[in-house]
Image (cartoon, coloured by chain):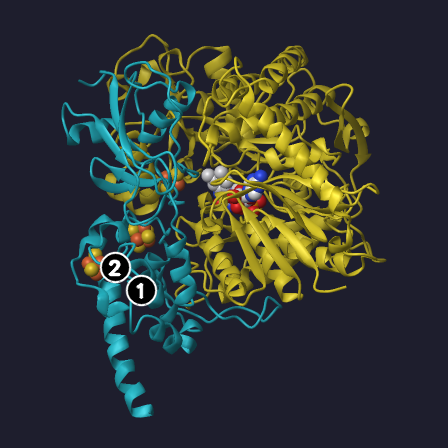
């Protein structure tokens, strides 16, 4: 066969790393992204990237990183891939360093590392407060170099719509839409890597970028791919409520002494600094005297949620609590928290050094995603070069990055995602080339009708929406979807509420299926595009809700007050959702977790953070 | 005036190369709105100020926290990011007048407020804005750097290719070949990296000659509008010195 052609969908950290590796292996990359890849969501990450380099002489090791990640994920993560990822983390950080990432340095000129949640070691490399941006740019630059050499062809401003699957069930290419001209077209390729990031938009507002919709994953799921652990969604306790987005307020604000409180009466309308100490309720400090405001993420999120929704004691009765730093001297704040305080100041228009910040938990990350497999070698380690490693359940389609399900179990540790994204691209890229090289016949020799029928299927869907009248505005429907999912499928989950939500989702599905674009524009028709995506997002929401409903235990981010304990006997299993056309929703099955290296133990965290 | 309905005038253009026109919109005020939340409101309820249904407005955005560069547009006559443009602040700029939104003028309009900035990415290709590593295989750590130099370079590495600088530059337009301040600053960034310095000459060559650094008229507009406070004119001065030196060495090499 000629040079293998691989379509990489997504130019975040995962997609770009995959593209670089494919180019190095002699493959031709078609790189698709809805935005210029340099604007991908990965730019938002601030904190850093984990790797046990042990520059501080603390005795950190890759095995300790492995254990922290498995334990942090509450023993839901398959262990061979996690072991491989943590073992490769130092190499990946060094590689990024060689690519020119401006990581902070020690006085000796070595890479500096800082503390993050879920570990006792300084294991997080960082570049100022914009680590994700710096890593993305470094990979973007390397891809541009391969592009200049003709090994990568970029299709920016193109949206992946679906995969072209032949009669044997093998993927032979993709169908994509040009978001300016709205043209829909097929691209033949021997393998595809989906690296499209997380599904934050399903929850209406989140810490995610607007382009993190989950659409590509949902589309592949509807074509038969398995979606794993959809019910595991991470909620970050401290985000800045906004009209348009919930911007992250880093954990370091609490690390530097930030105190969380609400007025004792929700009808108290005084400005916060006017409210005397005796009339404030420091609820975290009261309930957790030992850890106070530095309880782990899931606990802090649950408590804030309870105060606002169950006790109705949020500020002014709404969904907000104070995160207060005003007792700290200005100079100290500027020195230690300058960057993040400026974000608050810029977007809220209030100086957090003078007035307590108003924050609320927000949907942040999806541990679940497209199911991908892995092969192991005789010694039990993951086989990183096997063509089936990182492949989804559809032959020829791989997934990498936040959109895959592989590395974080039931809860992701901070700074492990930038790592898993890059590592998964590093693995999936070469695996896809190995697969393509082993194909008996390449995508070029597949009958044209196979491509035409998929283009027609997508064109029909889009034309149907454009021609439709009388339906609802898709942006209003997604607001409802977000509200539903936020109130019932985030921090606390009850079976009764989940059942009602599930019924409402069926109703919403019918409305989403009839949504209109309300835009007659022939180019850059963003409403048409969103009306097309919306029904898919509702399908993915059903996967999350059904997964949560079925899982009668509490594990990591999945918390059911009525089933408060982790139940390893029945639930140490990966949830697999597969689309069932008759039910117009998922059918669920389970496979046991691969815990061959570390025996499960109770997750009792003493330490603050995570 | 704080809670008064928000009035916005948007310069609309249904597609590339066709005429544009101003359309007025009005919407209820809510606390802490930014320009993006106003545009989202139009998506939900696409009617103009007179209540007449119109096509919703197209614009680009992604991160909503001024780090991706997507949402750049000209707001009240000044180029900036629409996600960090808070209604409370920008209404004060022109009391009593509607907020005005226009697409950037230095790039081809795709539709409404969306423009095509691919020229900026092409410039990055031209100046070889990357570190030419041997490969991704394990070669150990990169070169040591002192923290002071690192911090200087870090400032330049925050450029999000948003286009504010070139929008404000009198010498950058659709007819000129000028490569623009952002790309010149990237040359300085990569040439100051220990590995990048090995190919410094190539990058300098790329900004010498037509459309290169001598097209800069030193008007300083760029540095004043950069949302990341990148010291663009300092970069231009450095690059200018380096290219002069290179010109002389090239002369002797001949
Ligand atoms: C505010 C914030 C802070 C964070 N901080 C950290 C941190 O400090 N450390 C850490 O480890 N993690 C952090 N995370 C998590 C981490 O940033 C993300 O999980 C990670 O960047 C995801 O990378 P990705 O490559 O999978 O996808 P993304 O970066 O989301 O990229 C997805 C790509 O897919 C493209 N795309 C999407 N759909 C389509 C489609 N249909 N067709 C074509 N292209 C498509 C997009 O254009 C984009 O190029 C943070 C997350 C947030 C929200
Ligand atoms: S230099 Fe500044 S203004 Fe110019 S593109 Fe970069 S970030 Fe934008
Ligand atoms: S200093 Fe040079 S690059 Fe900057 S605005 Fe002026 S002419 Fe343009
Ligand atoms: S949306 Fe990213 S900079 Fe405004």
Can you identify the residue that label 2 sits on? B232
In the picture as drawn, the residue positioned furthest to the top comes out as A267
Chain shown in cyan: B
Is ligand 2 closer than 8 angstroms to the Cβ of mark 2?
yes
For the residue carrying disc 2, how many other residues have a C-alpha within 10 Å: few (<14), some (14-19), or many (20+)?
A: many
Chain shown in yellow: A
Which chain does tag 2 point to? B
Which chain does tag 1 point to? B
Is A196 in front, or is B178?
B178
Residue A239 as seen in the image, left or right of residue A608? left
Q: Is residue A97 above or below residue B221?
A: below
Relative image position of residue A538 (x, y in whole percent): 61, 23
Q: Secondary structure at mark 1?
A: helix
The circle on residue B184 is: 1
Residue A430 as seen in the image, left or right of residue A236? right
- Which of the two marks, 2 or 1, is nearer to us in this view? 1
Query: What is the CA distance from the residue labelled 2 to the residue labelled 1?
Result: 8 Å
Relative image position of residue A247 (x, y in whole percent): 41, 33
Quadrant location, the N terminus of chain A = bottom right
């Amino acid at each position: 066969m000629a040079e293998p052609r691989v379509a990489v969908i997504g130019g975040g950290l995962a997609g770009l790393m995959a593209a670089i590796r494919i180019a190095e292996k002699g493959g031709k990359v078609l790189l698709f992204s809805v935005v210029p890849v340099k604007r991908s969501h990965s730019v938002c990450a601030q904190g850093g990237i984990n790797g046990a380099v042990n520059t501080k002489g603390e005795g950190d090791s890759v095995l300790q990183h492995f254990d922290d990640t498995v334990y942090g994920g509450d023993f839901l993560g398959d262990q061979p891939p996690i072991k491989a990822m943590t073992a490769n983390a130092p190499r990946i950080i060094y590689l990024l360093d060689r690519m020119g990432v401006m990581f902070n340095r020690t006085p000796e000129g070595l890479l500096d590392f800082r503390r993050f949640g879920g570990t006792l070691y300084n294991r997080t490399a960082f570049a100022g407060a914009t680590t994700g941006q710096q890593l993305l740019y470094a990979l973007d630059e390397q891809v541009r170099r391969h592009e200049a050499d003709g090994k990568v062809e970029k299709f920016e401003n193109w949206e992946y719509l679906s995969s072209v699957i032949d009669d044997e069930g093998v993927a032979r290419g993709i169908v994509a839409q040009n978001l300016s001209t709205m043209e829909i077209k097929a691209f033949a390729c021997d393998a595809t890597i989906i690296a499209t990031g997380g599904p934050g938009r399903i929850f209406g507002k989140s810490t995610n970028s607007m382009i993190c919709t989950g659409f590509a994953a949902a589309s592949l799921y509807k074509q038969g791919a398995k979606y794993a652990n959809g019910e595991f969604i991470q909620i970050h306790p401290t985000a800045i409520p906004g009209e348009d987005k919930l911007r992250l307020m880093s954990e370091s604000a609490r690390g530097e002494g930030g105190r969380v409180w609400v007025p004792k009466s929700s009808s108290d309308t005084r400005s916060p600094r006017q409210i005397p100490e005796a009339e404030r309720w420091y609820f975290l400090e009261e309930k957790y005297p030992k850890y106070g405001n530095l309880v782990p993420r899931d606990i802090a999120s649950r408590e804030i949620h309870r105060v606002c929704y169950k006790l109705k004691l949020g500020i002014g009765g709404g969904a907000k609590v104070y995160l207060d730093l005003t007792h700290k001297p200005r100079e100290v704040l500027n020195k230690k928290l300058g960057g993040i305080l400026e974000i608050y100041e810029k977007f809220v228009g209030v100086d957090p050094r003078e007035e307590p910040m108003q924050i609320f938990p927000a949907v942040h990350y999806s541990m679940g995603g497209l199911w991908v497999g892995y092969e192991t070698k005789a010694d039990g380690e993951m086989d990183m070069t096997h063509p089936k490693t990182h492949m989804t359940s559809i032959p020829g389609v791989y997934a990498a990055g936040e959109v895959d399900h592989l590395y974080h179990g039931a809860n992701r540790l901070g700074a492990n995602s930038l790592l898993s994204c890059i590592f998964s691209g590093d693995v999936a890229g070469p695996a896809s080339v190995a697969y393509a090289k082993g194909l008996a016949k390449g995508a070029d020799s597949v009958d044209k009708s196979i491509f035409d029928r998929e283009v027609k299927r997508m064109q029909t869907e889009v034309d149907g929406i454009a021609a439709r009248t009388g339906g609802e505005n898709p942006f209003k429907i997604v607001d409802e979807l977000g509200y539903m999912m936020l109130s019932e499928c985030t921090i606390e989950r009850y079976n009764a509420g989940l059942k009602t939500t599930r019924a409402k989702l069926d109703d919403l599905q019918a409305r989403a299926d009839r949504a209109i674009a309300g835009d007659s524009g022939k180019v850059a028709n963003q409403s048409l595009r969103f009306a097309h995506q919306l029904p898919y997002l509702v399908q993915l929401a059903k996967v999350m809700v059904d997964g949560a409903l079925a899982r009668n235990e509490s594990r990591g981010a999945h918390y059911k007050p009525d089933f408060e304990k982790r139940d390893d006997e029945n639930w140490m299993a990966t949830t697999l959702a597969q689309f069932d056309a008759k039910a117009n929703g998922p059918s669920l099955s389970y496979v046991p977790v691969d815990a061959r290296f570390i025996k499960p133990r109770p997750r009792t965290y003493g330490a603050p953070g995570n | 005036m704080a809670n008064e309905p928000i009035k916005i005038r948007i310069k609309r253009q249904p597609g590339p190369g066709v005429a544009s026109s101003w359309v007025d919109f009005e919407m209820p005020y809510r606390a802490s709105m930014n320009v993006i939340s106003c545009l989202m409101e139009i998506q939900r309820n696409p009617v103009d100020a007179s209540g007449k249904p119109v096509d919703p407005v197209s614009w680009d955005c992604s991160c909503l926290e001024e780090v991706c560069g997507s949402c750049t547009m000209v707001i009240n006559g000044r180029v900036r990011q629409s996600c960090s443009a808070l209604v409370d602040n920008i209404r004060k700029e022109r009391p009593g007048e509607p907020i005005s939104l226009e697409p950037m003028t230095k790039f081809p309009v795709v539709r409404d407020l969306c423009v095509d900035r691919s020229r900026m990415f092409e410039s990055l290709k031209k100046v070889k804005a990357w570190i030419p590593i041997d490969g991704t295989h394990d070669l150990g750590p990169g070169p040591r750097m002192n923290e002071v130099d690192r911090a200087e370079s870090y400032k330049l590495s925050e450029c999000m290719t948003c286009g504010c600088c070139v929008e404000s530059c009198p010498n950058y337009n659709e007819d000129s070949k000028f490569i623009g301040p952002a790309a010149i600053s990237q040359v300085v960034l990569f040439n100051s990296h220990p590995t990048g310095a090995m190919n410094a000459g190539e990058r300098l060559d790329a900004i010498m000659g037509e459309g290169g650094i001598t097209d800069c008229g030193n008007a300083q507009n760029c540095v004043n509008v950069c949302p990341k406070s990148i010291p663009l004119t300092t970069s231009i001065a450095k690059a200018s010195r380096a290219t002069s030196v290179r010109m002389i060495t090239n002369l002797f090499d001949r």
